Image (cartoon, rainbow, N blue to C red):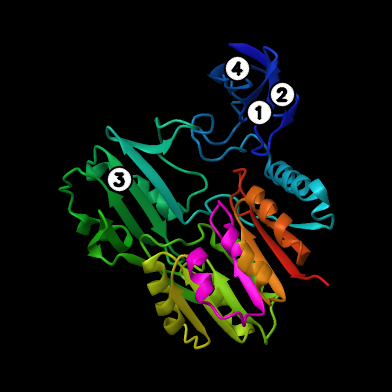
Amino acid sequence: MVKVKIERYNNQIEGVGYTGGKVIFVPKTKVGDIVDVSVTEDKTKYARGKVTSPNTNVDCPYFYECGGCYLRHFSYDESVKLKYNNLKQLFLKDNLYTGDIKVNKSSNYFNYRNKISLKIQNKKIGFYEEKTNSIVEIDECLIARDIINDFLKVIKEFKINNGTIVIRCNYNDELLIIINTDDEIKYKFDKLKENFKIAGVVLNNKAILNDDFIIDKLDNKLFKISYNSFFQVNNLGANKIIDIIKNNLDKDDDILDLYCGVGSIGLAASDKVKSVLGIEIVPNAIKNALFNAKMNNISNANFILGDVSKSLDKIKNDFNAIIVDPPRAGLDQNTINFILNSDAKKIIYVSCNPITLVRDLKIIKDKYNIKSVDMIDMFSYSYHIETVCVLDRGN
């Protein structure tokens, strides 16, 4: 046990102090706090610790154990300001971008998630404890949609000893339940229909009740989402991203949509542009995207299956706008080279990781100027954000 004064924050908004002549990171603290800390990790150059006398005013009873929301000890406005400051500093470094960053706060920072992933170990059901594989059992999640919290009450009836369960819901409060386990389950899933609208139950990658997909809505368009396809967990935040993108597109734009998923961005933008071509590596997501185009009567969008990095050599260089929404790892070198060698007049980069975003922009800025940066608070009370950067061709 050591006593630590919190002097600043790192880029994950963890408290940073000093003990024994080295830095110590203490999550879920505030600058100015003097706290008793249990050291959980002791390295040569740094240590990590856990507060032993937590703030009892936090509204979530699992906050100091759960590895989910990191920032519930701040007010919502404080948490957004801290995220903004982190993002601003990243862009100011090396004078990458000195203009205004527009902050898009969440209009609903409780019960916004349309998907949660639960772990089951020795019949315990919950989330992982921060930076461990220990289970924090939960009865409710304050950022999950109400219908998901209602469903949490019946999971124990499945009598699963070990495994995972993912719960997804849509605009109509329908549920898609995805279970992976080696246990034999004797529960009669038809019973769920008595109290819930069930889009489907998928057990070990096979639908055992209804379908293996769910239909959700963004930008007044419908999207089929297979059980293993990516879709934004916050519909309101996703609509904000789409609005920003559409406001920066023109009717003559031919769009190349990289990492397109089920086509949510490209299809939403299709009524503003001339054409859309999306590329995605997940087979079910591409099947979804093609289906979604037909379902929404969209004829100017097409989608192909492939690893973005390996597929670009086959793409004709006749796009004047490129949208990228990569995973947290950001863009690989081949994709960056493709962008730099393209004739695209604008690039719209959607990122869930500011660090890899800034890394990539430092290279892309040799040919493109950063026109605008938007921060979207998609994941309230976590340190995560979405960022939309619009770039246009330099001289």
Marker disc for residue 6: 2
- Is 109 or 82 nearer to us in this picture? 82
Q: Residues within 10 Å of mark 2 (few under 14, many from 20)?
A: many
Give SS at disc 1: loop
Location of the N terminus by quadrant is top right
Mark nearest the camera among 3 and 2 is: 2
Looking at the image, tell me whether mark 1 or mark 4 is earlier in sequence order. Answer: 1
Question: Dot 4, how many residues are within 10 Å of its Cα: few (below 14), some (14-19), or many (20+)?
Answer: many
Image mark count:
4
Measured in 3D between alpha carbons, the distance from the residue under mark 1 to the one under mark 2, in whole angstroms, is 7 Å
Does any portion of residue 102 appear in the rendered image? yes
Q: Residue at x 49, y 30 (%)?
A: 65
Residue 113 higher or lower than 315, as above or below: above
Distance of mark 3 from mark 1, alpha carbons? Answer: 33 Å
Q: Are marks 1 and 2 in contact (CB under 8 Å)?
A: yes
Looking at the rendering, the stretch of residues picked out in magenta corresponds to 308-335
Q: Are marks 3 and 4 in contact (CB under 8 Å)?
A: no
Picture layout, residue 112 above or below residue 70: below
Check disc 4 and report the residue beneath it.
37
Q: Read off the residue under disc 3.
A: 155
Residue 41: quadrant of the picture: top right
Q: Is label 3 in a helix, a strand or a loop?
A: helix
Residue 393: give its label: none
Of mark 1 and mark 2, the one earlier in the sequence is 2
Whole-number angstrom distance, CA of label 1 to CA of label 4 = 11 Å
x, y percentage for residue 340? 68, 67
